[in-house]
Amino acid sequence: MVKICCTCGKEKAALKRPKTSEQLCKTCFYAALEDEVHQTIIKHKLFSPGERVAVAASGGKDSTVLAHILTTLNERYSYGLDLFLLSIDEGITGYRDDSLETVKRNEQQYGIPLKILSYKELYGWTMDEIVRAIGHKNNCTFCGVFRRQALDRGAALMKADKMATGHNADDIAETVLLNILRGDVPRLGRCANIITGEDSAQPRVKPFKYTYEKEIVMYAFFKKLDYFSTECIYAPFAARGAAREFVKDLELVRPRAICDLIRSAEEFRLDAKGGQSHPVAGKCQRCGYISSQDVCKACVLLEGLNKGLPNLGVSRTRGSKGGKAGLPASVDA
Ligand code: SF4
Ligand code: ZN
């Protein structure tokens, strides 16, 4: 039996929305998803008119859909944002070089400028060189720490007011779960924040905080968006992979599980006795970038690499697969 779209009641339904189980036609699905992102942006005041916003772009599905939807909404609702794409070239042959070609095409497709910064120019090392020096064990720790800082540096260099990242609801639910599994109470309390680094020069915002990964994939697929889907050649078998599988299993039984995991972190409060304070953002004494320690993690890791002691600084960091193609081992999402 042909199913009819439950919103317009006219068109043939093209899909069942994973988040709500509604049968929708493509047009009504696009409208529903775009409207949810718009409502998230408005409700949480993610942007202000006139702001210059870096869209962290890897060429993957999340950041490609984010660039597409933000340019669409910016025009449709006159947000007045000055958007640009910011990409980091980690120096991973056969992975990042190909995905950067996608980002370069996105620059043309969405008509917004692109800035690419490389690990080589910032740190003097490519990820290929780092893996040759340290092996495959802790590569994502280096990559995640370096990328986080590289994005901050790129955003500062380009005089951005904010940075938008493509973290979706599944990513955040996984991070909540990982922080529970690690007993990382302070991070659990803040990992679901939709705005992070509010005291820094370029706060980070997550317009897809409530958007399901499956719906992002469907949106990209139906709209035939140009994105890169190959996994990094250094992707490890790590805790995040197990958490991801677990979240997917939960979603199968109960689609709301993703939202509920996020809400559990949102509702999480530290009492005065057990509460550990939020790390105070200061500046690294060596590179001058944001750090809660005297010397930032990137500088500690770099010191190890340059001294031929790559494990220096790694031991204090618990291993994980990088999220968004690479979160640092500690998971703030
Ligand atoms: Fe970097 Fe992600 Fe590749 Fe790890 S999986 S090396 S974090 S890009
Ligand atoms: Zn419809």
Image (cartoon, rainbow, N blue to C red):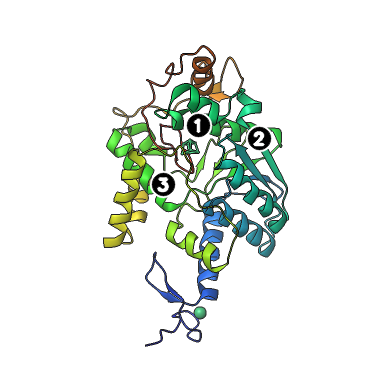
- Mark whose residue sits in front, 2 or 3: 2
**Quadrant hosting residue 182:** top left
Mark 2 → mark 3, Cα distance in angstroms: 26 Å
- The amino acid type found where label 1 is placed reads Cys
**Quadrant hosting residue 134:** top left
Q: Is mark 1 within 8 Å of ligand 1?
A: yes
The kind of secondary structure element at disc 1 is helix
- The amino acid type found where label 3 is placed reads Ile
Q: Are marks 2 and 3 in contact (CB under 8 Å)?
A: no
**What numbered label is drawn on residue 143?**
1
Left or right of residue 284: residue 251: left
Residue 56 shows in the view = no
Mark 2 → mark 1, Cα distance in angstroms: 14 Å
| Residue 63 in picture, x, y percent from top left | 56, 51
Crowdedness near tag 3: few (<14), some (14–19) or many (≥20) residues, C-alpha within 10 Å = many
State which tag comes first along the sequence, 2 or 3: 2
**What numbered label is drawn on residue 117?**
2
Residue 167 shows in the view = yes
- The amino acid type found where label 2 is placed reads Leu
In the image, 275 versus 213, the foreground residue is 213
Quadrant where the C terminus lies?
Answer: top left
- Residue at 54% x, 62% y is 220
**Quadrant hosting residue 235:** top left
